[in-house]
């Protein structure tokens, strides 16, 4: 039993430092130099509106002090050199006071800091506008334990607590520090930690190894469950035996047919209910997890006033100080993911602007859902609203968050808990086989949850997307979208039936379309002739908003009537890098080679007026039918949700998937 337990205070959040192999993440854990951030005037509009990158660069000195990596002693201790300062007002170590204030009954906390050496410990707080205030401070000498009792009452709309260390005549060492809460949880919740994987065994094994090396975060983990849906099995990887032995009986691997992300995550939900866990923690496979996030999510969820879904944030795996977003909501009129408020910046880089210097990060963000790269779901919620919809991939997490909210269960994207994941900028899942799932699942989610007549702007934007793909010669993508529209009429009961078969069906269509056939080297394609590109090679910009509809009509008409350049069938008119792969550029080509988002290959797009005509005609007719039958379809899908997401329905699908693998 810790001293905190003996004194009636329990750990809510431990101060941590980057692991030895992730020093590029140091700005997320500790800042060097002065404790002050951006001081705001009372009428300063920068407090309420985003700052441009150039403004940030003016405000933040690139030549400022840096943390010394050699001073990171352990995951919990760090040295402050003579005459230097370190701030823990950072993403992973500041205390997100407003979130505890909003969602839990905790109103008083305690900061406990253990140090050795000579210097000062100073406590700060912020408000929702990002204004910083000194709260308390203490001079320390020798081996010291500094305790600060703090209130959460002023944090209704936002704000954080944190502390800074400054050494004086000798170095100061932080031995450990933690944020504590008064009172005990009657029974700490037990969690099933579940990873869904599909042919990414190296990522999956690495995360299992991270967990094995940080066993202290697994105290309340009932089971670590790997749902392996691939052909490259995690169990067959070199090093798996060592990880299995280290985790012992906590680790279990389930091999099942490829039922997609929703099938893998639903299996985790199912097993967590079955084994009596209080929560399931869903983790994606292609991530690197900050293991301390596990205990933080559990500590917070255990103290929420009522069952709450608690998710972690996502940082860029290849630019590790970059946060994808601070929270996400669904635009109810368009049914697309959106930012919670206008101030929020997507892809904020903490190495450019730290927490103290970024005013909008101090405002509490309330969300509709959290991505299932890391998401803790109480099994009580699962028992009441069911498991994931059998979507395979896309929209399963957003739909579940919306369904939970309608049942009275909130979702919190919790600061200080996170994973590193491949950025969306390094993917393009709107093109290719995933387009089917994007279109179908977005439509179904809108049918179930939209508060607007005929789904608001959804059908209009869907038709616009059809036009963009078709004038871009992305015929395989459009074939998938048309299949999605057709399948809407098959009804919700078809979702389980096709869960394991739809992807192979879509992939089988690739041979019919050159735009779906990837080659690794651009030299595998004929070289374009000089001067064959559109408009003589002049830059092609996006049409203005007022010109968009006339432009679309003119472009579609031209592509329908004008035959492609005869030479374009044998020779592309040019090459386009993925970043230039925009519909308003592609629409001017008859034939062009386009690289993919991952940079692993390229495909040859060729204009085909017959395909354009037939696909546009069918897509328009299907959209018109959906519009006419919207109310019937909405009732059909809404009425079926409880059955389709039930434990019984999913159990049948899992059993069928197991039989398919025999």
Image: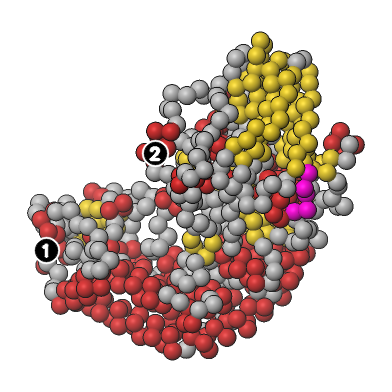
Say which of 244 and 451 sits in front. Answer: 451
Marker disc for residue 567: 1
Where does label 2 land, which residue?
A: 55
Say which of 493 and 147 sits in front. Answer: 147
Residue in the picture at 30% in, 72% down: 467
Give how far across and how far down residue 417 sits, in percent: 63, 46
Using residue 105 as the reference point, say whether residue 412 is left or right of it.
left
Kindly indicate the quadrant of the structure image that contains residue 565: bottom left
Instruction: Please identify the residue farthest to the right as the structure is shown.
Output: 6
In contact (CB < 8 Å): disc 2 and disc 1: no
Say which of 642 and 269 sits in front. Answer: 642
Using residue 100 as the reference point, say whether residue 497 is left or right of it.
left
Say which of 383 and 185 sits in front. Answer: 185
| Residue 105 located within the stretch drawn in magenta | yes
Give how far across and how far down residue 334 sits, in percent: 45, 70
- The relative height of residue 356 versus residue 654 in the rendered view (above or below) is above
- The relative height of residue 504 versus residue 358 in the rendered view (above or below) is below
Q: Which residues are magenta?
A: 104-108
Residue in the picture at 39% in, 82% down: 623
Name the quadrant of the C terminus: bottom right
* Residue 240 in view here: no
Residue in the picture at 48% in, 69% down: 335
Q: Secondary structure at mark 2?
A: helix
Q: Secondary structure at mark 1?
A: helix
């Amino acid at each position: 039993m810790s001293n905190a337990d003996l004194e009636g205070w329990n750990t809510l959040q431990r101060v941590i430092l980057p692991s030895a192999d992730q020093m590029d993440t140091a700005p997320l854990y500790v800042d060097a130099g002065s404790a002050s951030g951006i001081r705001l005037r009372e009428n300063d509009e920068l407090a309420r509106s985003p700052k441009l990158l150039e403004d940030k660069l003016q405000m933040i000195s690139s030549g400022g002090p840096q943390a010394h990596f050699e001073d990171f002693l352990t995951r919990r201790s760090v040295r402050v050199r003579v005459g230097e300062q370190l701030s823990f007002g950072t993403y992973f170590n500041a205390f997100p006071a407003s979130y505890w204030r909003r969602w839990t009954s905790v109103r008083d906390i305690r900061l406990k800091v253990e140090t050795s050496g000579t210097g000062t410990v100073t406590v700060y707080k912020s408000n929702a506008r990002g204004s910083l205030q000194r709260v308390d401070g203490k001079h320390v000498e020798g081996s010291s334990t500094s305790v600060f009792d703090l209130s959460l009452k002023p944090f209704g709309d936002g704000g954080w607590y944190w502390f800074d260390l400054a050494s004086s005549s000798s170095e100061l060492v932080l031995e450990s520090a933690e944020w504590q809460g008064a009172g005990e949880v009657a029974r700490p919740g037990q969690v099933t930690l579940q990873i869904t994987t599909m042919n990414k065994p190296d990522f999956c094994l690495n995360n299992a190894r991270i967990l094995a090396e940080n066993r202290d975060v697994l105290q309340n983990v009932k089971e670590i469950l790997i749902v392996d849906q691939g052909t490259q099995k995690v169990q067959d990887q070199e090093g798996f035996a060592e990880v299995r032995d280290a985790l012992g009986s906590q680790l279990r691997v389930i091999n099942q047919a490829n039922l997609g992300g929703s099938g893998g995550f639903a299996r985790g939900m199912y097993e967590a209910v079955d084994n009596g866990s209080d929560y399931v923690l869903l983790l994606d496979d292609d991530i690197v997890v900050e293991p301390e996030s596990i205990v933080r999510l559990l500590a917070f969820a255990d103290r929420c006033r009522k069952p709450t879904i608690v998710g972690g944030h996502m940082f860029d795996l290849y630019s590790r100080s970059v946060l994808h977003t601070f929270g996400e909501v669904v635009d109810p009129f368009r049914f697309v993911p959106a930012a919670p408020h206008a101030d929020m910046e997507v892809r904020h880089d903490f190495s450019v602007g730290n927490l103290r210097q970024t005013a909008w990060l101090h405002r509490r963000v309330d969300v509709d859902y959290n991505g299932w790269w890391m998401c803790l779901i109480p099994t009580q919620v699962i028992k009441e609203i069911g498991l994931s919809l059998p979507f395979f991939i896309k929209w399963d997490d957003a739909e579940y968050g919306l369904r939970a909210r309608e049942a009275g269960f909130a979702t919190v994207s919790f600061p200080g808990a996170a994973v590193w994941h491949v950025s969306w900028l390094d993917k393009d899942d709107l093109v290719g086989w995933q387009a089917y799932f994007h279109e179908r699942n977005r439509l179904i989610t809108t049918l179930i949850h939209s508060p607007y007549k005929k789904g608001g702007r959804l059908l209009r934007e869907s038709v616009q997307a059809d036009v963009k793909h078709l004038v871009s010669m992305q015929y395989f993508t459009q074939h998938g979208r048309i299949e999605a529209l057709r399948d809407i009429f098959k009804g919700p009961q078809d979702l389980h039936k096709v869960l394991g078969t739809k992807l192979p069906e879509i992939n089988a269509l690739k041979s019919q379309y050159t735009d779906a056939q990837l080659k690794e080297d651009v030299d595998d394609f004929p070289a374009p002739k000089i001067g064959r590109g559109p408009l003589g090679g002049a830059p092609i910009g996006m049409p203005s908003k007022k010109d968009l509809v006339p432009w679309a009509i003119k472009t579609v008409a031209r592509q329908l009537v004008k035959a492609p350049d005869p030479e374009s069938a044998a020779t592309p008119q040019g090459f386009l890098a993925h970043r230039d792969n925009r519909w308003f550029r592609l629409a001017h080509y008859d034939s062009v080679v386009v690289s993919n988002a991952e940079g692993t290959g390229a495909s040859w797009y060729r204009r085909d007026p017959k395909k354009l005509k037939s696909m546009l005609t069918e897509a328009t007719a299907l959209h018109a039918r959906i519009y006419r039958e919207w109310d019937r379809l909405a009732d059909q899908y809404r009425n079926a949700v409880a059955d389709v997401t039930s434990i019984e329905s999913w159990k049948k699908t899992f059993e069928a998937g197991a039989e398919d693998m025999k």
